[in-house]
Image: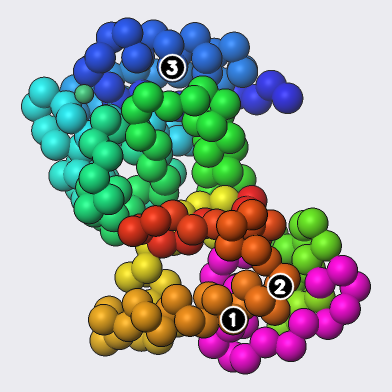
Amino acid sequence: MADSHRILIVEDDAGIRKLLRVTLVSQGYAVDEAANGLEGQQMLLAHRPDVIVLDLGLPDRDGQDLIRDWREWTSVPIIVLSAREQESDKVEALESGADDYLTKPFAQGELLARIKVSLRHAHKIAGDGVPVYAQDGLTVDLAARSVTLDGEEVRLTPIEYKLLSLFVRHAGKVLTHSHLLKEVWGKHSLDQSHTLRIHTQHLREKLKDDPLKPRFIMTEPGIGYRFRG
Ligand code: CA
């Protein structure tokens, strides 16, 4: 499906920029390119892209700083594309407000899928989406607070339901451990990752989800979880 969403690429490697541009244009996206943070900032202001694909290692600014700056005034989805493989870098980017993270070298299909998720999510925030998630036998009605799996009601504890509703509202996106802890248990629970693991495990059992071959909840090791989008 062609659409005219505008993607801003901020990346100093001309080869990768070209590869991204060719891929994105072939999918019907309009593309702006910036080779450093300053250009990226100018294009962000001038062209108001729908999604930003951001490299972290830029010649003039660190991408992590750009994310923090931009999040002060814009909620445009930011997908980080970086050679940095450290979990701490990924967590930092996500905590600063990035929406997703891909490590170089990346599969183009994967990037396109992540862009689609980001666009869909941005639209959901903007509009009044129907608050029902239905996929692969699972239905979560956020208005009625009801959950069914393969037509049968699933009984969840309040904590499990909170977790599930966060997952489905952010389906396809990584949610970090500390984000989930903050949202479900409040701000002072950052040391309770063990608790999070236990409740996620219970939720998986009730959804008949196999952690090794997940149908719904995928583990992002050292970072958090991603609900299938
Ligand atoms: Ca770079």
Looking at marks 1 and 3 on the same chain, the residue that comes earlier in the sequence is marked by 3
Viewed as shown, does residue 194 lie left or right of 37?
A: right
The mark nearer the N terminus, 2 or 1, is 1
In magenta, the rendered stretch is: 149-169
> Looking at the rendering, in which quadrant would you find the N terminus?
top right
In this rendering, is residue 55 above or below 26? below
Distance CA(mark 1)–CA(mark 3) = 40 Å
* Quarter holding residue 48: top left
Say which residue label 3 marks. 20
210 and 88: which one is in front?
210
Residue 151 drawn in magenta? yes
Which amino acid type is marked by label 1? His
Tag of residue 202: 1
Disc 1, SS = helix
Image location (x, y in percent) of residue 160: 58, 83
Expressed as whole percent of the image width and height from the top left, the position of residue 196 reads 43, 79
Pick whichever, 94 or 194, lies toward us.
194
* Image position of 167 with respect to 10: above or below: below
Residue position for label 2? 207
Residue 101: give its label.
none
Q: Name the quarter showing ligand 1.
A: top left
**How many numbered discs?**
3
Task: Determine crowd level at label 1: few under 14, some 14-19, many 20+ residues with C-alpha closer than 10 A.
Answer: some
- In depth, the one of 187 and 217 nearer the eye is 217
Indicate the amino acid at tag 3: Leu
Which residue type carries mark 2?
Answer: Leu
SS under mark 3: helix
* Res 148 quadrant in image: bottom right
Residue count near mark 3 (Cα–Cα under 10 Å), binned few <14, some 14–19, many ≥20:
many
Percent position (x, y) of residue 49?
A: 43, 32
Q: Residue at x 59, y 91 (%)?
A: 158
| Residue 51 location, quadrant | top left
